[in-house]
Image (spheres, rainbow, N blue to C red):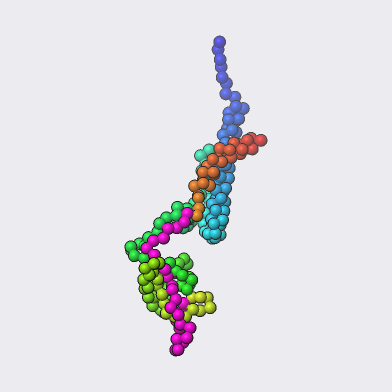
Amino acid sequence: MKLKLDITPDLVAAMAAEVKAGEKAVTAAMREAGTGLKTAWRGQITGVGLGRRLANSIRSQTYPKAGESLNAAALVWSKAPVIVGAHDTGPLIRSKDGFWLAIPLPAAGKSLRGGRITPGEWERRRGLRLRFVYRRTGPSLLVAEGRLNTKGQAVVSRSKTGRGKVTAPIFLLVPQVKLPKRLDLARDADRALDSVPGLIVANWVEAKI
């Protein structure tokens, strides 16, 4: 018995079409998985009350950026990885210099640079000196002598009689802080990964129809 295999132009064209369908399917699947993971992470962040701004730091990109490939991939990341990572892992935070962490209280107000105000910035802005108060049974304090304005923030008292003058707690001093774990990014990442085979099959079938 003699067997002979002839590769006809139609078969070559069919194989090329199948490869093209595969490229489209894999690229589309990775794009959907990446976008889905981005949406899931953003939903987690807003769901625990961390705000829309931090949620919008989550971005996604499919590679190649142009065209289609059987080796397509998706990357999902945050433009604020330190903040997002801290809420994902719940780290123990200590002072860099080995002393105290200063946690601003409502009377401290907010930093002009964004984020938490520091004792040094507070003194420069308010024109008041902070005084250390040690407490045996709780966090120590940094306090200031002044008055509270309508926003509840400590400011310089202009009263000559001392009317309205208070000793206001400005910062809590603690040796370390344990952030609670508020996010579970790995959970959504695993779900996105598990969805990829089904997405490829679905998009491959669709590409051939």
Which residue is drawn at the image coordinates 35% and 62% (left, top)? 96
Image height check: is 13 above or below 196?
above
Give the quadrant of residue 146: bottom left
Q: How many marks?
A: 0
Q: Is 115 inside the magenta-drawn segment?
A: no
Q: Position of residue 202 (x, y in %)?
A: 61, 38
Q: Dividing the image into 4 quarters, which one contains the N terminus? A: top right
Q: In this view, does 183 lie to the left or right of 11?
A: left
Residue lying at the far bottom of the rendered structure: 160
Q: Which residue lies furthest to the top in this view?
A: 1
Looking at the image, the residue that sits furthest to the left is 98
Nearest the eye: 3 or 193: 193
| Extreme residue toward the right, this view | 209
Q: Give the range drawn in magenta.
A: 154-181
The residue that appears at 36% across and 65% down in the rendered structure is 100
Place of residue 200 in the rendered image (x, y in percent of width and height, measured from the top left): 58, 38
Q: Answer whether residue 178 is magenta in the image.
A: yes
Query: Is 175 positioned to the left or the right of 85 in the image?
Result: left
